[in-house]
Structures are given as C-alpha cells and as structure tokens.
Image (tube, helix red, strand yellow):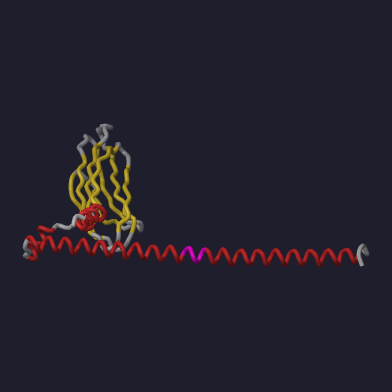
Amino acid sequence: MELIPCLFILNICLLSTIDALMFHLQPNHRKCLKEEIHKDILVTGEYDISDAIGQKASLKITDSRGHVLYNKEDATKGKFAFTTEEYDMFEVCFESHMIAGGHGADREVYLHMKHGVEAKNYQDIAKAEKLKPLEVELKKLEDLAESIVNDFAYMRAREEEMRDTNESTHSRVLYFSIFSMGCLLALATWQVLYLRRYFKAKKLIE
C-alpha cells in the first residue's frame, strides 16, 4: 500500500523541476545559465537583482537559434514566462553595466525558475474553469501523467535515434574495413605481379 505514494512522490521530484539559485554579478560582466527544456513546456521565472549605485543590469533569454524570448534592459525585479516551441537549449543571461559615478560593487542576483507542471497556476485555472478542489487535484494528476508519458516517449525516441546511429556507424566501419582489406589485397597482388615481371625482365627468374 505504501509503494504507490512513494512512486508518486518520486515522480513529482523528478518531473516537477524548480530551479532556485543566487549568485554574484560583477560590474561590467555577463553571466549566463543554460538548460535543456522539452517541447511545449511552460516556463516561468522570477528574478531580483540587488541595487548598486551607478550600475544597470539587463536580462535576456534566448534559444540556441538566437531568438529572444524575454528581454529587459533595466532589470531590477520582475517575472517572465514563455512556452517552448521545440526541444532546445535555452540561455538566461544577466549583464551588468557601469554608468558615470558608479561603484564597483558586486550585485546579488536571485533567480527562481519553474517549468512543467510546477509552472502552472492551478488557482487561476480553477477560477477560470470553476473547478472544485478535488477536480483541481485531478487536473494536477492528469498533467503529471501526461508529463510522464511525454518524457517516456521522448526517451524512447532518443533511444531509437541512438540505436540507429550506432547501427549506421557499425555498418560504415564494416564497409570501410572490407574496402581497406580489398585495397590491401589488390596492392599486394599488384606488387607480386610487378616484381615477377621485373625479375623475369632481368632474367633473375625463369
């Protein structure tokens, strides 16, 4: 009876991703964080950058193709949200700029990101769809189950892709080995025939 709750909690820990961190941003420096996220996943985040006299900070979120998903020039405190269009590597970059009369103090950056099931606001969903508390919990379970199915489907697709790549590489190595052996045998045969004609021409052998 205790196995199902344990598995349920384990799945929540694995699939409900929450990234909360704090780091220091030096003046006139840029610091970026990268993360791979699946397709059609809601990503939300909150950031808070400590004040520093004579400094401005900017925040930019881009994908691997350079598309800007969020951009804030004078970033101090705020929120962002976007939905991924495909599986990709996303980059969150903070950059500090010194202005006239600025001090060279480091700034503390707090970043709290959520994606997947944890990023959804089920209170707003319940109000919009007029759901009861039990229906909200069922909605969470439904979304979690869908997330699990999607993750397993992605892992299976990746496994098939890796298997196809391994089989293709193995076939290419095999064909190259056969071709190399054929070239070596042809070269050895040509050398034997050439040396035989040469020795006959010099009358060293009959």
**Quarter-of-image position of residue 184:** bottom right
Residue 84 screen position, x and y as percent = 27, 60
What residue occupies the far front of the structure in this picture? 1
Q: Is residue 20 above or below residue 160?
A: above
Q: Is residue 32 above or below residue 193?
A: above
**133 displayed left or right of 49:** left
Residue 140 screen position, x and y as percent = 16, 60
Q: Which residues are magenta?
A: 165-169
Residue 138 screen position, x and y as percent = 13, 63
Residue nearer the viewer, 107 or 153: 153
Q: Is residue 17 above or below residue 198?
A: above
Q: Is residue 126 magenta?
A: no
**78 displayed left or right of 23:** left
**81 displayed left or right of 92:** left
Residue, x 30% and y 60% (percent of image)? 38
Can you see residue 81? no
Q: Main secondary structure of the magenta part?
A: helix
